[in-house]
Structure formats: C-alpha cells, structure tokens
Amino acid sequence: MRTAPTDPTAALAALISANHRHVASRATEADAAADAVRSDARGGSASQAARTGAPYIAAITSGVGGPQLATAFELSQESLSILQAGSVGTSAFEIALAAPGVVILLVVVRLLAARSGTASSEFTRAEAEAIAQLDVVLRQSPVLRSRLDARKIRAVAIALDESSGRVHWLGEHPGQVEILKTSR
C-alpha cells in the first residue's frame, strides 16, 4: 500500500506518478490483468482506496467526466469532485476545496484529436484555455487564494488526452505569485 501524501506538492507528485502508471498499463495488452493487480494492491475496493488518504481532487472542467479523471489518476470516485466551469464562488466549490486531507485543484481541458500537422496548434489552444480558466478561478475565489497562500492546496492546469488517458501537466498559473501578492 502506498503512503498517503501529507502536503500538496507530494500529492501532485503522486497524481503524476499514477497517471504515468495508467498510461503505461494502457500501452500493454495485459490491461485487464494490470487493473486487477492494482485493485488487489489497493485492498480491492474503491471506497477503501478513498479512505487511505489519497489526494482529493477538485476538478473544474467543461466536458471531461469524473470516470475519465478517476481512471487517469487511479483514484476512486470518492476522491474526486467534478465542478463545472463557472462554479467558482458556489458552496460546492468551497466544500470541495475544504475536503479533508490534501486537496489538489485541477483545471481540466480536453485535448482534442488533432489532424496531422495541427497537433501543436491544438496543444497551444488547450494550454491557453486551461490557463485562462485557472486565471478566472484565481481571481474570483478568495477561498482558493487564501489556501494557496497558506500552501494548503495546489492549483494546476492540465489537458487530458481521452484517447490515451495521458495527462499533459500545464502547471500553475504563470502569474499566480503576483495574483496572490495583489490580493493580500
């Protein structure tokens, strides 16, 4: 059994590692066997996996569902809250940010299948969309800014390639430090 991360940086590293394992397992023909091994390693039940202290994900998304994210990070549904874009300031948003344990806020955009020669423009579009959504969230939520300032949470933009399950980590908002300074 993996030890539960105790801070947001360790939690983010655990999510990255889980996605690498997920993508690697999809690349093999023994996909079903790998899923069975992971299930046994977690104690067999999704709700038990949630109780081990896995990082809690609050995901702001438009179009990416909970099952895809849970699978991409090898998490149970109980370790995930899906919030629609524009839900900043709602009680659901604040409840998700205050979940027990370590919380990671992900702003998720779908990476669309690109035709030959347009992959870089699709990635550029997804990155710009994710960072723009993260900007809105940072500027509209004093709760999020407070938790970021106290280093109790990490907010990261990602692009999810649903065909492969691969997560492209776009990182924190490039102006996050400045946004936090001006909001104090």
Image (spheres, helix red, strand yellow):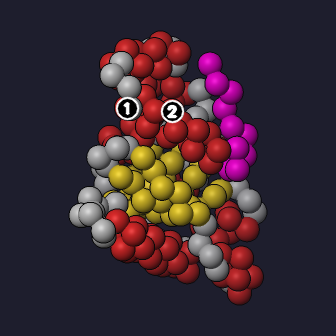
Residues drawn in magenta: 1-10
**Residue 9 falls within the magenta-colored stretch:** yes
- Image: 182 above or below 114: below
Image location of residue 129, percent across then percent down: 40, 74
The mark total stands at 2
Q: Residue furthest bottom?
A: 182
Q: Position of residue 69 (x, y in %)?
A: 39, 45
Query: Disc 1 designates what residue?
Result: 26
Mark 1 nearby-residue class (10 Å; few <14, some 14–19, many ≥20): some
Q: Amino acid at mark 2?
A: Arg
Question: How much space separates mark 2 and mark 1, taking CA atoms?
Answer: 9 Å
Who's the residue at 64% across and 71% down the image?
145
Q: Is residue 36 among the parts visible in the rendering?
A: yes
Q: Which residue is mark 2?
A: 21
Describe the element under mark 2 as helix, strand or loop: helix
Other-residue count near label 2 (Cα within 10 Å), few / some / many at <14 / 14–19 / ≥20: some
Rendered residue at 64%/24% (across/down): 2
